[in-house]
Image (cartoon, grey):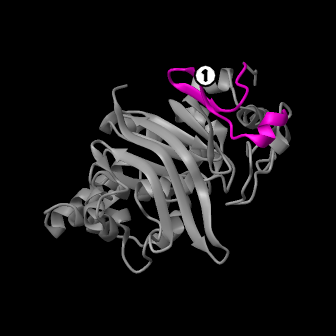
Amino acid sequence: MSDEILKIRGLNVEMLTENGMVQLVRGVRIDLKEGEIHGIVGESGCGKTVTAKSVMRLHDERYTRYSGSIRFGDTDILTIKEGDMRKLRGSQIAYVFQNPMTSFDSLFTIGEQIAEGIRAHSKLPKKEAYAKAVELLESVGVTPGEKRAAQYPHEFSGGMLQRAMIAMSVSCDPKVLIADEATTALDVTMQARVLELLKKLRDEKGLSILCITHNFGVVAEICDTVTVMYAGHVAESGTVSEIFHSPRHPYTEELIKNIKYELNSGDEDADPAPQPKSGEKHGGCAYAYKCKYAQDICFREKPPLRYVSDDHFAECHFTERRGA
């Protein structure tokens, strides 16, 4: 692995609601290295998608306030103009959305929509862009590409649409791909195919991938490093091996134990410890009221960021070794 291609530091995201400005993400710190697959894992509402969409500035900025920095190479994404940001979207940083069913326009064929994205960032003629769209569909296993490119979204299964969405996302050879819950609505067999496809794209195209998921099993399958989020905070971050074998935040420990519970019970919605509501204010550690290790200081003071190793840190007052 080489240097970081994406570096998030002290990211705070506030959004205007009917109750005023609500802080959804607090002080997020994430590094994505070149050629790496980095997972962001946590429950629904923990700030994963808010963080991911901030990287591409996809929030309605009339009602959103950012602070901190998101550096893509030498560029601070949060400070550039919208026109410059449009040039980055798709060509340098691409996004695979959670629900492919709503990501395609039902009035145009799949091939036309992929080709449109290619032409938006290149000078390819319409015919050549369409031919490239056919090749991309073939490359992600949507075959025969020529026939599938001429079909409409309603003629595709969920798994085919997801792979077509990935084909569209990599059509302009971006350096970073953000895959937001890319396997959520798929059956187990198709989930495995999509995960294999992401690994293949990383290996063949040198993509750096930010993988957003609530499933620690996905992290174990394809990720090199992982960030665990809870209530808008980064609870812990490190290599997958370190996190699984030596978790230093009690929430991480519970999430990993929950994998075993899901396997034994078949309950995919098992919840180890419900998190506070989005934007809910708290004095000390957000996890203190759920934590079996909590002490008085946990309720009074914000936990510090403690490094266990160069690549492994946890936001916790007590980071002594805990086994999963």
Q: Is residue 112 above or below residue 217?
A: below
> Which quadrant would residue 228 be assigned to in this image?
top right
303 in magenta? yes
Q: Which residue is mark 1?
A: 242
**Residue 249 visible in the current orientation:** yes
Q: Which residues are magenta?
A: 295-320
Q: Quadrant of the N terminus?
A: top left
Q: Is residue 106 above or below residue 290?
A: below
**Residue 144 visible in the current orientation:** no
* Residue 303 location (% of width, % of height): 68, 36
Q: Is residue 227 above or below residue 126?
A: above
> Which quadrant would residue 145 be assigned to in this image?
bottom left
37 in magenta? no
Q: Is residue 217 above or below residue 212?
A: above
Tag 1 secondary structure: helix
Q: Residue at x 50, y 29 (%)?
A: 224
* Residue 50 location (% of width, % of height): 54, 57
Quick one: which residue is furthest to the bottom in this view?
Answer: 107
* Residue 256 location (% of width, % of height): 73, 33
Q: Residue at x 22, y 60 (%)?
A: 131
Mark 1 residue crowding within 10 angstroms, few (<14) / some (14–19) / many (20+)? some
Q: Amino acid at mark 1?
A: Glu
Q: Residue at x 49, y 53 (%)?
A: 52
Pick the front one: 179 or 107: 179
Viewed as shown, does residue 180 lie left or right of 257? Answer: left
Q: Quadrant of the C terminus?
A: top right
Q: How many marks?
A: 1
